[in-house]
């Protein structure tokens, strides 16, 4: 005789759903009736107002989820370092694969960094031009310092081999 799984009930009744109309006492009130009893919660209203006003301002960055406590300066520094490191690693890889191309990229990076820092020095204080030039110059300096590694190692190796 086959063993029947004790967890399966073959005589289980089918689920039934009851659908019926709501009685008059459960009707949705009209807007006027609803507004007679309605009390405004100031915290909720100000929260909605602030959120809705921020939609029209594209400068307001929308923050979602945990971890949005990073200040604007921290974000800029993190972005600057990340772009600089990625650029530097790319330049270093290019210098290893094709030293003349790596040297050309290093030269252009140095020129760009110098130009950006000059523009920053000449720009008015607290201006967008100064901020952008500083940002670009710092990225080039980080990138150049990382990217120059393989060229410096190659020059050192070549000098050792000459002796």
Image: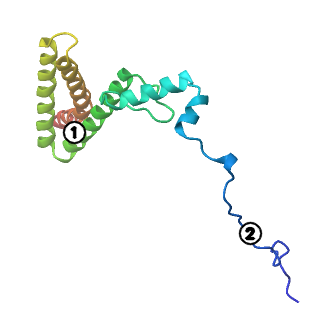
- Distance between the Cα atoms at labels 2 and 1? 68 Å
Instruction: Provide residue 61's location: percent of width, then percent of height.
Output: 36, 30
Image quadrant in which the C terminus is located: top left
The image position of residue 105, as x and y in percent, is 14, 37
- Which residue is tagged 2? 15
The quarter of the displayed image where residue 71 is located: top left
Q: How is the image coloured?
A: rainbow
Q: Residues within 10 Å of mark 2 (few under 14, many from 20)?
A: few
Residue at figure coordinates x 31%, y 28% from the top left = 57
Viewer-closest of 131 and 80? 131
Q: Which residue is mark 1?
A: 91
Q: Nearer the viewer, mark 2 or mark 1?
A: 2
Residue 75 picture location, percent across and down: 36, 27
How many marks overall?
A: 2
Q: Pick out the residue farthest to the top.
A: 125
Q: Quadrant of residue 155?
A: top left
Residue beneath the point at 19% across and 17% down: 130
SS for callout 2:
loop
Left/right of residue 52 with respect to residue 126 in the rendered view: right
Label 1 sits on a secondary structure element that is helix
Residue 68 lies, in percent from the top left, at: 46, 29
Q: Say whether residue 117 is left or right of residue 46.
A: left
Q: Quadrant of the N terminus?
A: bottom right
First reached walking from the N terminus: tag 2 or tag 1: 2
Which of these two is toward me, 47 or 122?
A: 47
In this view, which residue lies farthest toward the bottom?
1
Determine whether 157 is above or below 41 in the image. below
């Amino acid at each position: 005789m086959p063993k029947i799984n004790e967890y399966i009930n073959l005589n289980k009744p089918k689920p039934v759903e009851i659908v019926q109309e709501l009685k008059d006492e459960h009707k949705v009130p009209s807007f006027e009736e609803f507004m007679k009893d309605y009390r405004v919660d100031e915290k909720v209203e100000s929260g909605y107002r602030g959120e809705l006003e921020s939609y029209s301002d594209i400068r307001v960055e929308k923050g979602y989820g945990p971890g949005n406590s990073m200040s604007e300066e921290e974000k800029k520094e993190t972005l600057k370092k990340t772009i600089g490191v990625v650029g530097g690693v790319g330049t270093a890889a290019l210098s290893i694969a094709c030293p003349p191309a790596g040297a050309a990229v290093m030269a252009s990076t140095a020129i760009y960094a110098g130009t950006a820092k000059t523009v920053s020095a000449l720009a008015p204080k607290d201006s967008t031009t100064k901020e952008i030039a500083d940002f670009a110059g710092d990225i080039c300096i980080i990138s150049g310092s990382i990217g120059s590694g393989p060229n410096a190692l190659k020059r050192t190796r070549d000098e050792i081999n000459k002796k």
